[in-house]
Image (cartoon, rainbow, N blue to C red):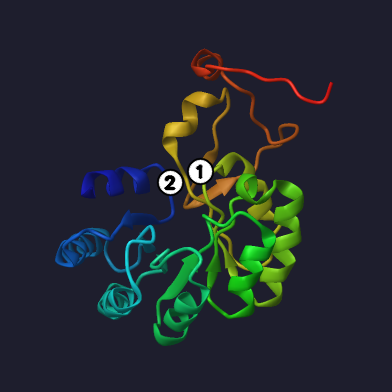
Amino acid sequence: MLENASASLASGIGGIKIKVGQPDWKTDIARLEKVREHLGDDVPLMVDANQQWDRPTAMRLGRIFEQFNLVWIEEPLDAYDAEGHAHLARSLDTAIATGEMLASVGEHLRLIEVDAVDIIQPDAPRIGGFTQFLRLAPLAEQKNLQLAPHFAMEIHLHLAATYPHGAWVEHFDWLDPLFNEHLQIRDGRMHLSARPGLGFTLSEQAHAWTVATAEFGR
């Protein structure tokens, strides 16, 4: 884990996110201690619980995690527990991030309305594409929320670049074989290309991995 973190930073990535939510919560703390010690105090560090905790556990560990100066705690609770996330957001100094599992603008609006999130994480393909994402973004902007879209970085880089309040974009190097072009990452920033459209074309490897096709609209 420490070697991977170092390699990611060396490649130009601007922050490290690790998974938490182990059956034994002491394992999470031990891992975080090692990672923060390894990275130092200045490297942005986030954790992702993937909905593994109940409300008491999330509160208890959230308070313990304060010492690690995290950028955010992601999905500490069930994705649809807006009230529980709101209570955490009010009670903890660390920002609460969630939203990647939600499937509509309306479901994200529920989080926004009850102040359940500090950093909202919509997934454009999951909520209906560019149009729906651009409906959601002004609602988040009105609450001065930060934005950290989920997955599909080739799409979300463009959407994040339009957002006026701090945006993060996840990086998944295992998507690289799908495309002939690759994202340019330097000094902790992803750089938009001048290529047409999204700036990516599918590789021969992507075609080789395709197991089924379908046509629509005729």
Residue lying at 74% horizontally and 34% vertically, measured from the top left: 197
* Left or right: where 38 falls relative to 121: left
Q: Is residue 140 above or below residue 150?
A: below
Residue furthest right in the image? 218
Contact, mark 2 vs mark 1 (Cβ under 8 Å) = yes
Q: Quadrant of residue 77?
A: bottom left
Residue at left offset 84%, top offset 21%: 218
Callout 1 secondary element = strand
Q: Find disc 2 in the rendering and name its residue.
A: 12
Indicate the secondary structure of the residue bearing disc 2. Answer: loop
Q: Position of residue 199 (x, y in %)?
A: 67, 33
The amino acid pointed to by label 1 is Ile
198 up-or-down from 62: above or below: above
Whole-angstrom CA distance, mark 2 to mark 1, is: 6 Å
Q: Residue visible at 59% across and 80% down? A: 114
Name the image quarter holding residue 108: bottom right
**Mark 1 nearby-residue class (10 Å; few <14, some 14–19, many ≥20):** some
Q: Earlier in the sequence, mark 2 or mark 1?
A: 2
* Farthest-out residue, bottom: 91
Which residue was labeled with disc 1? 185
Within 10 Å of the Cα at label 2, are there few (<14), some (14-19), or many (20+) other Cα atoms? some
The location of residue 168, given as percent across then percent down, is: 53, 57
Q: In this rendering, is residue 11 above or below 112? A: above
The amino acid sitting under disc 2 is Gly
Check the image and report above or below for 204 versus 182.
above
Observer-nearest residue: 181 or 144? 144
Q: Describe residue 188's horizontal placement relative to residue 167 as left or right.
A: left
| Badge number at residue 86 | none
